[in-house]
Amino acid sequence: MGFGSWAIGGAGWQFGWGKQNDSDSIAAIHCALELGINWIDTAAAYGLGHSEEVVNRALAAALDTWPDAQPYVFTKCGLRWDDRGQTRRVLTAASIRQECEDSLRRLKVEALDLYQIHWPVADTQELAEGWSTMAQLQREGKVRWIGVSNFNVEQLKLAQSIAPITSLQPPYSLVHPEVEREILPYCKSQGIGVIVYSPMASGLLTGAMTRERVSRLPEDDWRKHNPDFNEPRLSAHLALVERLRAIGLRLGCTPGEVAVAWTLRNPAVTAAIVGARRPAQVAEMAAAGEIQLTQSDLKEIAAVAQVAA
């Protein structure tokens, strides 16, 4: 598992999670390092650069305690923003190069461990230009590995015709299992690593989300108006959580850990990104990678997940 830093970007942009205390974010990252998590996933767009800055601050402060355990840092490009925090997809060569320099500056590193295109564009010519630029940045030594996020099979094939893809980062959870149909089998057949995001459906499957908590989400939290957090879907999702809770009680873990373990049971999945805003959330999820779900557990989950999907 890796530490996901979408939420620690805070508020002020199109897909923000509401106000976030930077001290809590730094403490959460330090907790992850202490528990042995050795990679962090972020993006330029998260908090409009703020997430990358917080990650840098956390790692700089951790040097004295963990001098030999500095984690890999993955980040993304391709989402540019305006003064109102609204994002748009841009994959031109000039834009990606500028984003790379900006991320190197915010993270204060000489090279990015894994650089990913955050979202594809419909224009195949611009998509090809973007991926060609990523490959060039790799050849120049500014990035070590290159990957993509949210690509479909056709887009993956286009990118592969230009340069090898290290990894794909797709959404994957019991709430959104859509990538199981074509995308995960394709990645497995092609040897493309898969690091899934939102395995707990952005907090929906943690076991801590209730109707009351959803109703109290601030207006600047993107989840407030997302269909998954509103009826008619919400009731089905909460019913699924209760099934995960029952399984978790048998296994001695939380519903969220069961949800993450469910994604990791797929042989195409390399790892899962688990987001956290506070140290306690990291500690709660630390064992998810070790949980082994039985066939009986999986059948029990599937019976309810069909309703939630």
Image (cartoon, rainbow, N blue to C red):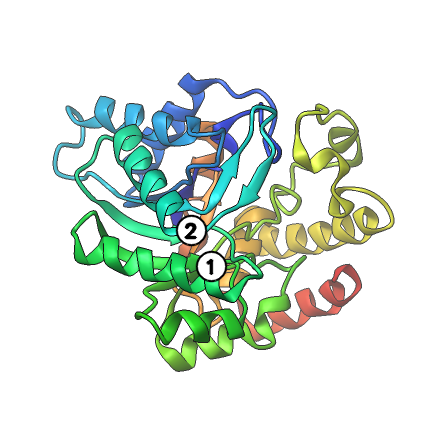
Alpha-carbon span between mark 1 and mark 2:
6 Å
Instruction: Please name the residue shown 74% across and 62% down the image.
Output: 309
Q: Residues within 10 Å of mark 2 (few under 14, many from 20)?
A: some
Residue 92's tag is 2
Q: Quadrant of residue 27?
A: top left
Residue 147 vs residue 41, the one in the foreground = 147
Q: Quadrant of residue 105?
A: top left
In x, y percent, where is residue 287? 42, 49
Q: Is residue 2 above or below residue 184?
A: above
Q: Residues within 10 Å of mark 1 (few under 14, many from 20)?
A: some
Instruction: Please name the residue shown 56% across and 56% down the image.
Output: 171
Identify the residue position indicated by label 1 in the image: 126
Q: Say which element carries label 2.
A: loop
Residue 298 in view in this figure: yes
Residue 187 vs residue 101, the one in the foreground = 101
Q: Are marks 1 and 2 in contact (CB under 8 Å)?
A: yes
Residue 192 vs residue 133, the one in the foreground = 133
Q: Say which element carries label 1.
A: helix
Residue 246 vs residue 88, the one in the foreground = 88
198 horizontally vs 213: left or right? left
In x, y percent, where is residue 263? 52, 62
**The residue positioned farthest toward the bottom in the image shown:** 189
Disc 1 residue type (three-letter): Glu
Disc 2 residue type (three-letter): Thr
